[in-house]
Image: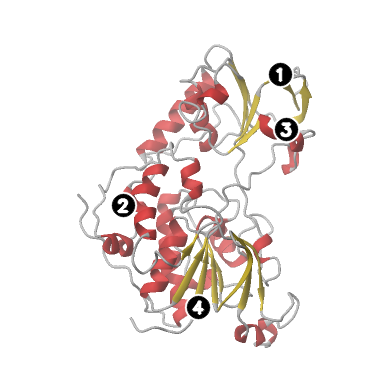
Amino acid sequence: MARTGKRVAVIGAGPIGLEAALYAARSGFDVQVYEADSVGASLRDWGHVTLFTPWSMNASPLAVEALGLNFPAQETPTGAQMVSDYLEPLAALPELHDRIHTFHRVVTIGRGGLLKGEAILAAGDKRRTRQPFRILMDAPQGERIEEADFVIDTTGVYGQPNAMGRGGIPARGERFLGTRKFEGIPDVLNRDKNLFSGKKVLVVGGGLSAATTLRDLSKSDVAAVHWVNRGNNPPLVPMPNDPLPTREALVQDANSLAKNPPEHWTVYSRSQVLAFEINGGQVRVTLDSPDTSPFDVDLVVNQTGFRPKNALYRELQVHECYATQGPMALSAALMGSKGSDCTTQSSQGANTLKSPEPNFYILGNKSYGRSNNFLLRVGHEQIRDAFQLITGNPEHNLYKEPAAHA
């Protein structure tokens, strides 16, 4: 395709970031990808976890064609397999390999010589459309500033955990737990086995991440498990005729652990953490239930979910939803859409990706804010929709029907 002469900066080299970069390159743009860590770093962190969705829902037809690969359609990869079999080959493509800048952590983004409150497009002032974005980042050689005509933020939410205390704020003492607190999904059976072996463990959360950790803990040699969640018992609501067998099995296993906890397990339903207190080499935990006495643990695993980090675009005119922290137009569309299961969702259309800040797009998991039902397939549709806006061509579509999978 003919070169446009326009510069696209993609922030993040995860699944959606690399897909967006490939789409930009194939659409004729000068694309650069800035990644704070290595390619697929977040997926590497929970590489032991098997995704609920199969390859057919994770690999876009454009990327499959570019790689010349056929993935087993119904096979569900692990996070590690997504990186090794998909993301790393994508990053190595001729049109991308020298455009991906790893260990370049974007600090913040501004707009030319304009301050946040200046040049409001909705009021008829178009100066922002004529000013390039200025991107400040920490690079291996020091600070660096780059410019771009379009910016796509695909940095996701992993690494920005919610707090464990009541009301969404940290419980007393939570901020000072240090290495006694584990955030993310620990690999208690392999990588993190020595950390958890023989320990008393507190798990806070009642979602699928907590379920994954708890199922692994049930197979480990931990000394005791305390499971605190805000919901009922059983905490997870099964989906009738769940189209994702891996998810269905996890829900069943976690609910079974809640209803019939193993020896040395205690389940606290409809409970929240009030305080953590360092007690010698352990952590004393106080819950909000008057019938529960404080108890001591060695490790605290926070599985309360994640939230987007908005510091990147604090100097841009981005309208956030007051409930989810996602972009307002998309959040409103999602709240009004039917069906809560990710497998029934699709892109909400190009207009929902627009922001008061022209030519700035939040795609992928981060676009859903604190909502946890994002699907990679929807992210691919978002990329298509975003580039219809970027190119000004509502018919621009590089996705074809995927080839038959083995």
**Residue receiving disc 2:** 56
Q: Earlier in the sequence, mark 1 or mark 4?
A: 4
Q: Earlier in the sequence, mark 2 or mark 4?
A: 4
Q: Identify which amino acid the numbered label 4 is placed on.
A: Arg
Residue 9's tag is none
Q: Identify which amino acid the numbered label 2 is placed on.
A: Ser
Residue 296's tag is 1
Mark 4 neighbour density, 10 Å: few (under 14) some (14–19) many (20 or more): some
**Residue receiving disc 4:** 7
| Secondary-structure class at tag 1 | strand
Q: Identify which amino acid the numbered label 1 is placed on.
A: Asp
Mark 1 vs mark 4, foreground winner is 4
**Residue receiving disc 3:** 177
| Secondary-structure class at tag 3 | loop
Picture coordinates of residue 127 (x, y %)?
66, 87
Mark 3 vs mark 2, foreground winner is 3
* Residue 233 is at least partly visible in this image: yes
Picture coordinates of residue 329 (x, y %)?
59, 67
Mark 2 vs mark 4, foreground winner is 4
In the figure, residue 376 lies in which quadrant?
A: bottom left
CA distance separating discs 3 and 4? 43 Å
Residue beneath the point at 35% across and 43% down: 77
Q: Identify which amino acid the numbered label 3 is placed on.
A: Leu
